[in-house]
Amino acid sequence: MRTFSFLASTLLLCTILSACSIYRVNVQQGNVVSQKELAQIHKGMDKAEVSAVLGAPLLQNPWNSNEWVYSYSDKPAYGSTTVRNIILHFSQDGSLQSISGDVTALTNK
């Protein structure tokens, strides 16, 4: 009888503790820019064409409307956060002049 009560209490304790596990999710935020999308962007494109390919930028400098920032962060359930920024610079007439930021991180994927 004593062995049965010990076994039953151990089983009950294991069942209760297994229900207390913490579930963590991957959190992705911002603009996901793939290699395929980045390959479609080239100098001379206007803002509407870039927006059609990449979507609206996450950040626009209020003092310089000719700079768009596409930022992306990935926080896996267990691990360190990865942040990527792609910065597009436009000329005064609205055509794409240059791309900077973490462009090499995307092209190596």
Image: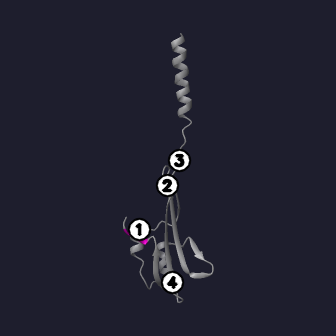
Residue lying at 52% horizontally and 68% vertically, measured from the top left: 71
Q: Residue 107's image quarter? A: bottom left
Q: CA distance from mark 2 to mark 1?
A: 18 Å
What residue is shown with label 1? 106
- Ranked by sequence position, the earlier of labels 4 and 3 is 3
Mark 2 / mark 4, whichever is N-terminal = 2
Number of residues whose C-alpha sits closer than 10 Å to that of mark 2, classed few (under 14), some (14–19) or many (20 or more): few
Q: Judge the density around disc 1: few (<14), some (14-19), many (≥20) Cα neighbours within 10 Å.
A: some
Task: Kindly check if marks 1 and 3 are in contact, taking CB atoms under 8 A apart as contact.
Answer: no
Q: CA distance from mark 4 to mark 1?
A: 21 Å
Residue 98: x and y in percent read 46, 81
- Outermost residue to the top: 1
Name above or below for residue 77 compared with residue 18: below
Amino acid type for the residue under numbered disc 1? Leu
- Estimate how packed mark 4 is, as few (under 14), some (14 to 19) or many (20 or more) residues with alpha carbons within 10 Å: many
In reply to whether residue 2 is colored magenta, the answer given is no
Q: Residue 103's image quarter?
A: bottom left
Q: Which residue is mark 3?
A: 24
Start-end of magenta stretch: 103-107
According to the picture, the residue beneath numbered tag 4 turns out to be 90
Dot 2 corresponds to which residue?
A: 80
x and y percentages locating residue 105 in the rendered image: 41, 67
Q: Is residue 10 above or below residue 4?
A: below
C-alpha separation, residue under disc 1 versus residue under disc 3: 26 Å
Is label 4 in a helix, a strand or a loop?
strand
